[in-house]
Image: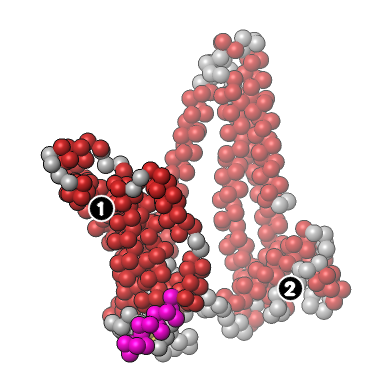
Amino acid sequence: MPVSWIASCVIALAVVGYIIGRMRAVSQAGGDTRRLHSRTNYYGWNVALFTAIPALVLILIWQFVQPPLVLQSALGKVPEAASAEVSNQSLFVSDVLRTANSLDRAISRKVLTADEVTGLTLENKDALAKMTAAQLPLATSVNATVLTAAQDYVATSRMGNTILGIAALVLGLGGFAFAYLRINPAFRARNVVESFVKGMLIASASIAIFTTLGIVLSMLFESGNFFSQYPWQDFFFGTTWSPKFGGGSQLGILPLVWGTLYISFIALAVAVPIGLFAAIYMSEYASPRLRSVAKPLIEILAGIPTIVYGLFALITVGPMLRDYFAQPLGLGNSGSSVMTAGLVMGIMLIPFVSSLSDDIINAVPQSLRDGALGLGSTPSETVRKVVLPAALPGIVGAILLAASRAIGETMIVVMGAGAAAKLDLNPFEAMTTITVKIVSQLTGDTDFAAPETLVAFALGLTLFVVTLGLNIVALYVVRKYREQYE
């Protein structure tokens, strides 16, 4: 039974429980709802929640737990001799999953029966032709070992879904009966429902915390695997980035850190002054009519996809900088450079700084402006000495957001700055960033046990630490200046 059908049955049972719960509450009160502690809707929701929530939680947990267990079981039944012949374990697992997906869909579409899938062999041309005609071909590199593992995966998964359906329905019916039998005029249904909802809200709020914890732990675990194979001294202090699958790699992070900081610095040098001056003008000097037109036009920049900015850098900005600056000054002959990516990224970041700073400046109390003007300050002195210091914590937050966006950008760097990892002060030379190399190391058919792949997690952890440091600095600035203006 598909999981969607199981969930639909549970939800339908909960709807029935809502209706029957209300009817029983009215019946227990002898038709006089004034005798009930809570409104009739709460009695219905009490039954519906006890019916649906435990069963749906079981389905959700099952969806996360079942696939790895089933895969481990299928791979565990592969003969050792056949397993030893597999040169790339990750490719083998991918072929098994692709083949299993095709077989499962063949059963669901009734192209083949479950018995035919179980007895399928590579010599059965008729069954394979049926699957090909239904656009359900097996993996391109399928062999007898892959097919056997995929068949076991499908059989175990379908059996697991059957067990899940029975368990979910039993749990739903148990919750239904438990909640239904508790209904009486004195039962505090409203309190129970509100506690249930409060628990759901707490669980929802905890998702962000556990997601962050999971991301950090996964990076720490995989980074630990990497550093067990590659010296941390060579990683953090190495000046050469030259990954080579098969051995002999030099994975020094310093060229990537330099490229990331260099490009981000140029981007912020463009975005922060322009964005901040635009925010000051729109909030303090522009007329309402001009502001209503200018601000939406600036914010349009935030809605442009980064790939479009990358094309703009590749086709327009890069050649222009090369022809008018780099070549005449003898600084380079390439259109891909740090300056190209930094300028285009700075344009992209202008609305982040401008819009947020504008909202923050407008939030400064008008009484501060009136007091400064009343003491004889000019409008420009009021902005410099009163409005900007009062809005500084928020402006720092806007700049931090722009910095985080710049550090994490990938497409503009790929198309505007190239992929060369090197240490150089020339802004018209091609360089790259940490995010670009994370993508390149995880792209294609890679061996996830090799240090050349695991280095992506070490790079991600380094990027996380840098961003965390920026947040700590910004928090310090915000707290220091907020106390003066509250």
Percent x, y of residue 324: 38, 82
User: Mark 2–mark 1 contact, CB under 8 Å?
Assistant: no
The quarter of the displayed image where residue 454 is located: bottom left
Highlighted magenta segment, given as a residue range: 317-331
Mark 2 is surrounded, within 10 Å at the Cα level, by few (under 14), some (14 to 19) or many (20 or more) other residues, namely many
The amino acid sitting under disc 2 is Leu
* 331 or 161, nearer to the observer: 331
Mark 1 is surrounded, within 10 Å at the Cα level, by few (under 14), some (14 to 19) or many (20 or more) other residues, namely some
Q: Is residue 204 visible?
A: yes
Residue 32: give its label: none
Which type of secondary structure does the marked residue at label 2 adopt?
Answer: loop
* 180 or 323, nearer to the observer: 323
Task: Decide if residue 233 is on the left or right side of residue 210.
Answer: left
Query: Which quadrant is the C terminus positioned in?
Result: top left
Percent x, y of residue 354: 35, 54
Q: Is residue 442 visible?
A: no
**Pointer 1 residue:** 475
Task: Decide if residue 109 is on the left or right side of residue 17.
Answer: right
330 inside magenta stretch: yes
Percent x, y of residue 188: 51, 21
What residue sits 61% from the left and 26% below the top?
44
* 93 or 309, nearer to the observer: 309
What residue sits 45% from the left and 71% below the top?
412
**Pointer 2 residue:** 138
Against 314, residue 173 (above or below) is above
Percent x, y of residue 394: 29, 49
Along the polypeptide, which appears first: circle 2 or circle 1?
A: 2
